[in-house]
Amino acid sequence: MLPSSSHAELIEKIKGGYKLKSKDEMTPEYYEHLVNLLTQQADSELAGAIGYTPWIAKAPTVKEKLIVSNIVKDEVRHAKVIYDLLEELGIDVDAHVAKHNFEFRIDDTATDVLKSTRAADDKRVNIFYYPIDTWADFVMFQTCMDRGAGHQLEDVKLASYEPWAEAIKGIFKEEMMHVHHGDMWVKTIATERHDEAQAALELWYPRTMNIFGRPNTTKNRIYQSLGLKHRDNDAVRTAFRQEIEEIAAEVHLTMPKWTPEWEKVEEDGVIAG
Ligand SMILES: [Fe+2]
Ligand SMILES: [Fe+2]
């Protein structure tokens, strides 16, 4: 690894489009941020796969049981690909995974009760702590969360760590297939059992809006300077929201109200000024 003293030089190289290929080219600062982002992704993929498994048994048809099985396999593969990158960076992945319970879900199903509070000490994105209780939830999760993840992965395709950017290409394609599967079902359910689709949207849309984080954070600016993200959190969220608005309009679902947590706090006067 390079010394911290060469960090400014590394940022300049990255600004010029340079892609890193191994740990030898990283400074401790770059390494720490990269490991953090990779762990968030890998833990989310694994928690996602495990949360889906009951839906192999509960899927409505044999064809759907096979589709769900394939989605579970995709998600475990995504986890493995990203954990392999972490292993190459010297992380003891099996020890990390053994320390956490990836089956854990919270009992409280209020829309976005967690907000930015962590429910456990693995690094999965908060939305993966919520249980998936109905088939409408299962498919709405894909329409919302897989789509949200897809927008985030658009940035990873450009990441300054080349092995990550390469690995994302295949993962991205599979996530788009999951989104397509979710959209197809959401449209069917919205037509046949409108209230069920509306209830699922009320749950999963606000939760997904919360995955992107606050606008204009110091952390996001650091990630951008390191070439590990390319847009502000809010720009990614807006791209996601616009697509959901189009789908909702198409099948006559009402867009749920979403007030960002940070605005709620400011309305309450807690951090105002
Ligand atoms: Fe995935
Ligand atoms: Fe997925």
Image: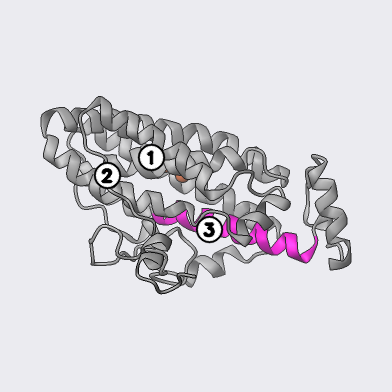
Q: Tell me the kind of residue under disc 2.
A: Phe
Q: CA distance from mark 2 to mark 1?
A: 11 Å
Q: Is residue 74 visible in the rendered structure shown here? A: no
Q: Is residue 259 magenta?
A: no
Vertical side of 215 occupied by 156: above or below: above
Which residue is tagged 3?
40
Q: Position of residue 160 (x, y in %)?
A: 73, 45
| Labels 2 & 3 near each other (Cβ < 8 A) | no
Front residue of 21 and 130 = 130
Secondary structure beneath dot 3 equals helix
Vertical side of 151 occupied by 63: above or below: above
Magenta residues, start to end? 27-47
Vertical side of 113 occupied by 230: above or below: above
Residue displayed at 38% across by 37% down: 70
Secondary structure beneath dot 2 equals helix
Residue displayed at 17% across by 37% down: 60
| Residue neighbourhood size for the residue with mark 2, other residues' Cα within 10 Å, grouped as few (<14), some (14–19), many (≥20) | many
| Quadrant occupied by the N terminus | bottom right
Vertical side of 78 occupied by 125: above or below: below
Which residue is tagged 2?
138
Beta carbon at label 1 within 8 Å of ligand 2: yes
Q: Tell me the kind of residue under disc 1.
A: Ile
Q: How many numbered tags mark residues here?
A: 3
Which residue is tagged 1?
71
Lower position in the chain sequence, tag 3 or tag 1: 3
Q: Residue furthest top?
A: 250
Q: Is residue 134 visible in the rendered structure shown here? A: yes
Residue displayed at 83% across by 60% down: 7
